Image (cartoon, helix red, strand yellow):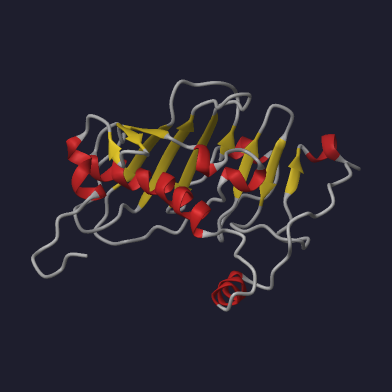
Amino acid sequence: MVSAPGATPAVTTSATAAATSRRDITGKLAHPAQHGGVNAAELSLIRADQPQAVKSSATTAPLWSILELKFPARGSKPAVTMTWYDGGKLPPKELFQGEKLITHDGGSLVIGTKGTLFTRTWHGGETDVDRFLLLPRKQFEGVQMPAPTLPRTPSHHHEWASACLGKGTTLSPFSYASVLTESLLLGNVALRAGKTIQWDRDGMRAIGCPEADPFVRPQFRAGWSF
């Protein structure tokens, strides 16, 4: 779930999780930057709130988790809160406004001041099954959608292969995807550290939280360094 209700002072990731002895994380959520919410390259500070449940073990991920990232306002752009659900957890039912709940293949809700953009799969699409919806439906009946501007691609596998062959670039290059991945991985750092973290992107560290250092810069045995 992504919402942009107004300004907040810092980027926050809160994590709630149930521990388990096996790895079972299946949820997916599209990044708000895909819908004009946040430019990942602008993110400089992320704060992770203390998990409110049992911490995952040292060797396995939790059975489920709920992670909240709060990105601060940037210039004329308001603050954005992003909530990640996995392991079968879902946003509150009322946020779907009568639509079928996401039960597999992920999805996203981008909640604004005038309506909600509901993507019914992790990637979105152009068919009646996976095309995004504007909610509430009645309010947006007859709305003229903008013409497509991004190039279409057969698949991300084709994109990758073509880019390797020097035929264009991917739609999510390393310059973008690396920062996106960094922001989401901080949810795992919060779970492992078991406490609030505030992330300094430029310094690549959790401010005032040495407990997070081993998960950011792990120490490897001799002969296994890189």
Residue nearest the observer in this picture, 185 or 169: 169
- Location of residue 93 (image quadrant): top right
- Location of residue 187 (image quadrant): top left
Quadrant in which the N terminus appears: top right
Q: Position of residue 129 (x, y in %)?
A: 73, 61
**Residue at position x 63%, y 35% in the image:** 94
Residue 38 relative to residue 140: left or right? left
Residue lying at the far front of the rendered structure: 166
* In the rendered image, the vertical position of residue 167 relative to residue 214, given as above or below: below
- Residue 112 visible to an observer of this rendering: yes
Residue 14 relative to residue 112: left or right? left
Q: Position of residue 66 (x, y in %)?
A: 42, 42
- Location of residue 33 (image quadrant): top right
Numbered marks: total: 0
Residue lying at the far left of the rendered structure: 222
Quadrant in which the C terminus appears: bottom left
Residue nearest the observer in this picture, 81 or 174: 174
Residue 85 relative to residue 50: left or right? right
- Residue 28 visible to an observer of this rendering: no
Q: Position of residue 183 (x, y in %)?
A: 43, 44
* In the rendered image, the vertical position of residue 177 relative to residue 7, given as above or below: below
Residue nearest the observer in this picture, 166 or 99: 166
**Residue at position x 65%, y 54% in the image:** 120
Residue nearest the observer in this picture, 72 or 167: 167
**Residue at position x 28%, y 36% in the image:** 206
* In the rendered image, the vertical position of residue 74 relative to residue 31, given as above or below: above
Q: Position of residue 99 (x, y in %)?
A: 70, 46
